[in-house]
Amino acid sequence: MIHEELQQLQQLANKVTKKIEQIELEKQSLEEQLGALQRELQEKETSLDHFKNQIKISKIVNNIPVENIASAELRNRIDNYIKEIDKIITYLSE
């Protein structure tokens, strides 16, 4: 009788141990997923900040008064530089 109860307790202890191991593995997996999602969020926030800066620069360029052909050419050059920088940033972020 006592022997049977000890066996049952041992079986229950084994089940609990297996369940704890399973939960620990699940916890580790969830922590890894959380880390990946946090990194992804940081990348998206960085991209958003870059996009906001691009908009600010474009507004500054558009507010430059066009008094002569040289100013219009300067504006076009700045726009082209911004586009090239965006391409480089996109390439580097991939």
Image (spheres, rainbow, N blue to C red):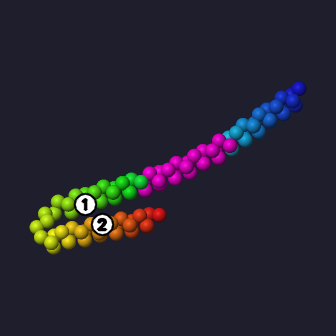
Q: Amino acid at mark 1?
A: Ser
Number of numbered tags placed on the structure image: 2
- Tell me, yes or no, whether the highlighted magenta stretch contains residue 28: yes
Query: Over which residues does the magenta segment extend?
Result: 22-43
Determine whether label 1 and label 2 are within 8 Å by CB.
yes
Horizontal arrangement in the rendering, residue 66 relative to residue 30 (left or right): left
Q: Quadrant of residue 11?
A: top right
Q: Is residue 55 above or below residue 29?
A: below
Instruction: Identify which residue is drawn at 68% across, 40% down.
Output: 20
Depth order, front residue of 73/36:
73
Residue wearing tag 1 = 58
Circle 2 Cα neighbour tier, 10 Å, few/some/many (<14 / 14–19 / ≥20) = some
Q: Amino acid at mark 2?
A: Ile
Q: Quadrant of residue 10?
A: top right
Q: Position of residue 78 (x, y in %)?
A: 25, 68
Depth order, front residue of 20/94:
94
| Main secondary structure type of the part rendered in magenta | helix
Disc 2, SS: helix
Disc 1, SS: helix
Horizontal arrangement in the rendering, residue 34 relative to residue 18 (left or right): left
- Tell me, yes or no, whether the highlighted magenta stretch contains residue 40: yes
Q: State which quarter of the image contains the N terminus.
A: top right
Which numbered marker is on residue 82? 2
